[in-house]
Image (spheres, helix red, strand yellow):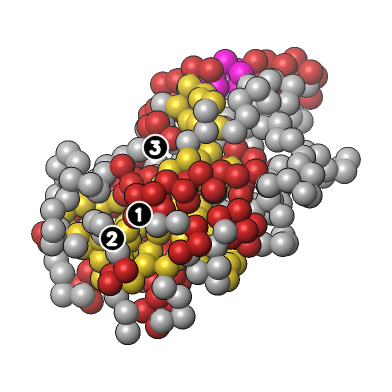
Amino acid sequence: MFQPVISGTGVFTPKEVITNSELVVAFNAYADRFNAENADDIAVGKTPEIGHSSDEFVVAASGIHQRYVMDKKGILDPEVMHPLLRQRDDDEPGIMAEMALDACQKALEQAGCKGEDVDLIICAASNLERAYPAVAIEIQQLLGAGGFAFDMNVACSSATFGIKAAADMIRAGSARRALVVNPEICSGHLEWRDRDCHFIFGDVATATLIECEEDAKGDFFEIISAKCQTQFSNNIRNNNGFLRRSRPDGMKDRRDMQFMQEGRKVFKEVLPIVSKHILVHIAEKGLEAGDLKRLWLHQANKAMNDFIGRKVLGRVPDPGEQPNILQDYANTSSAGSIIAFSKYSQDLEAGDTGVICSFGAGYSVGSVIVRKG
């Protein structure tokens, strides 16, 4: 048995930013246009009127102030309201592999490794740009890595589920060094025309390098344990499954082809599951809440994270104990907890323990207990 450790992380951040104010202007322009075009149906109650959004509403509902995206122009065009992502030729790198490559190179550099040192790549993301060939295998080729690679989708828990899979394979000796990569183009499956969710998502890519402790060249976090849990629910759903593309007439306006959620039900049902999951997991390893120096939670909603932090720690978390990054990145699905870990872990000292946790559609929950080496 080998001991897996996290020895490097990397974050690719898109260049384009959309502030709440910019997003609200575009949404309200769309709403006015829609209401004018459907005035007669709205007057007789056949079609609901679309109300305006506001910066204050977005912040109060989510804690988000801005988001990074791969394409700003299409999202902010009231006549388009989705990213305009160029269809690439089959002989050029895909957009997700290109994003992932940047994050992987940063993780490798932090760990003092090269692409050829890697023998396992897991591309774990909530939406993949194609069914096959696997995006992970494309990343493998771009990095010059060996071994094997495969894709994984457990929605917002994809990263922690991927870390567990990689850590288990390293423990068993079937891999020595793995990259778990999370290229998330969440803007491609968000319905930007829906006031209740038009502000939620952003784009990003993260990478986590996991290797045998004896191979680590620098600082690392020992993976004490990883635990996964799933429970079926329709309260978060996307019936399309891939990045938004032009679709035949009759399908393009189907609301269920994009991200959908019953927010209040999710809040009520998911939070107790997540809190209990973390507490049971740490107890299984002989730990108590007071032993945790940090919680790196899925970045979905500030109120959700605040609730989980209080339930797990038994008190209001001190500043820095439960870092949030969604105010800058918005919800980046599986990548959110890894961004938080990457940006807020270097100050921990040897022996400090924390939990990386993600949760989302499925329902799914994944937690990884780590200790600074």
Spatial CA span between label 3 and label 1: 29 Å
Q: Are marks 3 and 1 in contact (CB under 8 Å)?
A: no
Bin the neighbour count of mark 1 within 10 Å (Cα to Cα): few under 14, some 14-19, many 20 and up.
Answer: few
Magenta stretch in the rendered image: 23-28
Bin the neighbour count of mark 2 within 10 Å (Cα to Cα): few under 14, some 14-19, many 20 and up.
Answer: few
Closest to the observer, 248 or 197: 248
Residue at coordinates 45% horizontally, 75% vertically from top-left?
A: 175
Closest to the observer, 96 or 140: 140
Spatial CA span between label 3 and label 2: 31 Å
Q: Position of residue 213 (x, y in %)?
A: 28, 70
Instruction: Tell me, yes or no, whether the highlighted magenta stretch contains residue 10.
Output: no
- The answer to whether 190 appears left or right of 225 in the picture is right
Residue at coordinates 17% horizontally, 50% vertically from top-left?
A: 348
> In the picture shown, does residue 43 fall above or below 48?
above
Q: Which of the marked residues, 3 or 1, is nearer the chain's N terminus?
A: 1
Q: Which of the marked residues, 3 or 2, is nearer the chain's N terminus?
A: 2
Q: Secondary structure at mark 3?
A: helix
Question: What is the total number of numbered labels drawn onto the structure image?
Answer: 3
Q: Nearer the viewer, mark 3 or mark 1?
A: 1
Q: Nearer the viewer, mark 3 or mark 2?
A: 2
Q: Are marks 1 and 2 in contact (CB under 8 Å)?
A: yes
The residue where tag 3 is placed is 326
What amino acid type is highlighted by mark number 1? Gly
Residue at coordinates 32% horizontally, 58% vertically from top-left?
A: 7
Q: Indicate the quadrant containing the C terminus: top left, top right, bottom left or bottom right.
A: bottom left
The residue where tag 1 is placed is 112
Closest to the observer, 35 or 212: 212
Q: Which mark is residue 217?
A: 2
Instruction: Tell me, yes or no, whether the highlighted magenta stretch contains residue 26.
Output: yes
> In the picture shown, does residue 280 fall above or below 343?
below
